[in-house]
Amino acid sequence: MTERVTLSNDLLLSEVALMLSEGCTVTLLAKGSSMFPFIIGGCDRVVLQKTDCIQVGDIVLAYLTGRSYVLHRIYRIADDDIILMGDGNVSEIERCRRENICGKVLRIMHSGKHIECSSLKERCKVRIWMALLPFRKYILGVCRYWYK
């Protein structure tokens, strides 16, 4: 019989960050709705790995100094300053430093399918989604209605 253990997000993600820093690849069940519609909390799993190669559009696990960990998309990189935003957010952004990026999502496991985040198809979808930011509030409303 498998025993189920529940940990707080901060405790779990601090351990995940440690594992990533040691070179491990980690698979996590996503929680929350901040990355909807690309990642569905409670349903999708993400595969993370430590990397120094990050770019705009990547989904990363980042530590926000004095706050907590977030799994959000990179919207802007200016030297060592990184601007993050969840796909399900319409205006809230987070800021972190390059050294606070713990790992990058390599793939999303959704309904038995593996979605490679670096594929051309996925990168195009992300670029379109990011460009639609001014209309995101309405698009998310429709997506959430359909997903129910």
Image (spheres, helix red, strand yellow):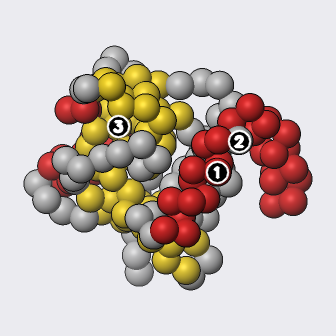
Residue corresponding to mark 2: 132
Name the amino acid, label 2. Leu
Residue at the extreme top of the image, as rendered = 66
> Which is nearer the N-term, disc 1 or disc 3?
3
Q: Residue 123 location, x and y as percent?
A: 51, 59
Residue corresponding to mark 3: 62
Residue 41 visible from this viewpoint: no
Q: Secondary structure at mark 1?
A: helix
Q: Nearer the viewer, residue 59 or 9?
A: 59
Locate residue 146: give its quadrant.
bottom right
In the image, taking residue 9 as reference, residue 25 lies left or right, namely: left
> Which is nearer the N-term, disc 2 or disc 3?
3
Could you tell me which residue is drawn at 53 percent across and 25 percent down?
93
Could you tell me which residue is drawn at 74 percent across and 32 percent down?
134
In the image, taking residue 57 as reference, residue 21 lies left or right, namely: left
Residue corresponding to mark 1: 128
